[in-house]
């Protein structure tokens, strides 16, 4: 039986669902899958202790705003993995998140498959670009779509495979959206990161504000900088960080999910876009090159570029219930056919 080791040594607390999607997909291949994850992940994922080759101690977790400390923690973690885990017994090693510097300095194996969640970083840092070019000589990067793959090719990296991000299970909530509603449509923007141009050119537009008031549309945003806030009775703000159970309730009870990522969101995919597919949610997307892939998820064009198109798209969705998500979670499941 093929033995696969899945390592996520760079703890990203928002990647609990991503790790679960990938691990479940690997298990579905029939392989003997073993794990090296942070204790934070171990406590939140449903896998038995027997699946773990090593649990990374909490002291080595990622710390926001401390890049030097983080790099040292990554290197210590990789060294511990080398000491604690018999890497040689595995036919494949998969790295769940790419930190270029530490992986280049202390790679746990050769011939690894390395998930790269954001390829645009190679365009922004010549050091990261050179390190990834070096890593690509003996390893293979995993990206989520051809747009990300094309960005790798632009810097001379051709050693990559495309594997879809995958979808979480549909949210299981007890909320009854219609019973609790005291307004019309609800549009929810789940991310705390938002495009300034969307705020300035769309949401601040007087025709848009008049439209959402006349149609009794409630727009829910995450807390943001004061200079981005709009005071209006139909616009409400949630804390930037809310418990996942509360997030699921708000998500499930919303009619439309709004995606408006900043320009810095480049060469990556949105986990929320796959949550929309899993939960059959209709979506409105502020135009962004990295979100073009979402067009194929719906039987309508979910992308708008200005205030007029926002009103037009919203009106279409209100008047035509046949406009919907047509992609299935199964069709977007990760594929590991390339594993040798």
Image (cartoon, rainbow, N blue to C red):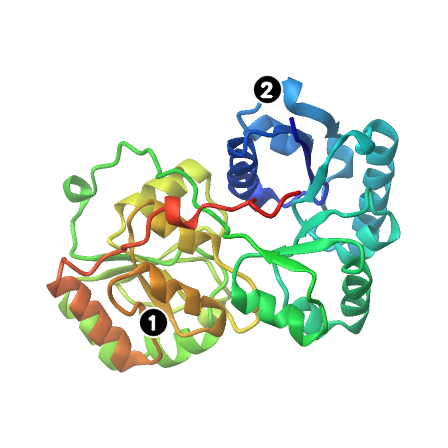
- Indicate left or right for 49 with 136 as reference: left
Q: Is residue 326 left or right of residue 32?
A: left
Residue 262: give x, y in percent of width and height. 51, 70
Look at the picture and state if 161 lies above or below 210.
above
At horizontal 68% and vertical 67% (from top left) the residue drawn is: 121
Percent x, y of residue 290: 49, 69
Q: Residue at x 38, y 49 (%)?
A: 331
User: Which mark sits nearer the N-terminus, 1 or 2?
Assistant: 2
- Relative to residue 253, is residue 237 depicted above or below? below
Q: Position of residue 171 (x, y in %)?
A: 35, 38
Residue 84 in view here: yes
Give the structural element (helix, strand or loop) at label 1: strand
Residue closer to the observer: 284 or 25: 25
User: What percent of the width, then of the height, locates residue 264?
Assistant: 57, 71
Which quarter of the rendering shows the C terminus? top right
Mark 1: few/some/many CA within 10 Å (<14, 14-19, 20+) = many
Residue lying at the far left of the rendered structure: 319
For the residue pair 166 and 161, the one nearer the viewer reads as 161
Q: CA distance from mark 1 to mark 2?
A: 42 Å
Say if 82 sits above or below 258 in the image: above
Q: Is residue 265 visible?
A: no
Residue at horizontal 39 percent and vertical 39 percent from the top: 246
Which label belongs to residue 48?
Answer: 2
* Mark 1, residue position: 303
- Residue 213 location, quadrant: bottom left
Q: In the picture shown, does residue 87 fall above or below 106?
A: above
Quadrant in which the N terminus is drawn:
top right
């Amino acid at each position: 039986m093929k033995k696969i080791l899945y390592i996520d040594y760079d703890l990203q607390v928002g990647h609990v669902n991503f790790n679960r999607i990938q691990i479940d997909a690997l298990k579905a291949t029939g392989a003997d899958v073993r794990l090296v994850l942070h204790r934070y992940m171990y406590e939140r994922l449903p896998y038995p202790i027997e699946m773990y080759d090593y649990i990374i101690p909490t002291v080595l977790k990622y710390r926001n705003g401390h890049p030097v400390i983080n790099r040292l923690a990554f290197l210590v973690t990789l060294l511990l993995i080398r000491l604690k885990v018999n890497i040689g017994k595995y036919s494949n090693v998969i790295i769940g998140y790419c930190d270029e510097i530490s992986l280049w300095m202390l790679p746990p194996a050769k011939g690894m498959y390395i998930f790269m969640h954001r390829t645009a970083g190679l365009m922004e840092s010549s050091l990261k670009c050179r390190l990834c070019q070096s890593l690509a000589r003996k390893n293979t990067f995993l990206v989520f779509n051809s747009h990300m793959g094309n960005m790798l090719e632009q810097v001379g990296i051709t050693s990559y495979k495309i594997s879809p991000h995958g979808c979480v299970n549909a949210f299981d909530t007890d909320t009854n959206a219609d019973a609790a509603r005291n307004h019309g449509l609800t549009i929810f923007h789940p991310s705390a990161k938002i495009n300034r141009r969307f705020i300035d050119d769309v949401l601040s537009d007087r025709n848009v504000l008049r439209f959402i008031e006349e149609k009794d549309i409630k727009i829910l945003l995450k807390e943001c900088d004061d200079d981005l806030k709009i005071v209006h009775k139909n616009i409400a703000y949630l804390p930037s960080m809310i418990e996942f159970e509360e997030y699921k309730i708000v998500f499930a009870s919303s009619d439309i999910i709004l995606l408006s990522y900043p320009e810095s969101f480049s060469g990556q995919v949105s986990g929320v876009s796959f949550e929309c597919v899993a939960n059959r949610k209709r979506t409105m997307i502020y135009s962004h090159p990295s979100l073009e892939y979402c067009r194929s998820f719906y039987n309508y064009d979910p992308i708008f570029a200005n205030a007029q198109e926002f009103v037009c798209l919203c009106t279409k969705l209100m008047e035509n219930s046949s406009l919907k998500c047509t992609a299935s979670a199964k069709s977007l499941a990760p594929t590991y056919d390339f594993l040798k």
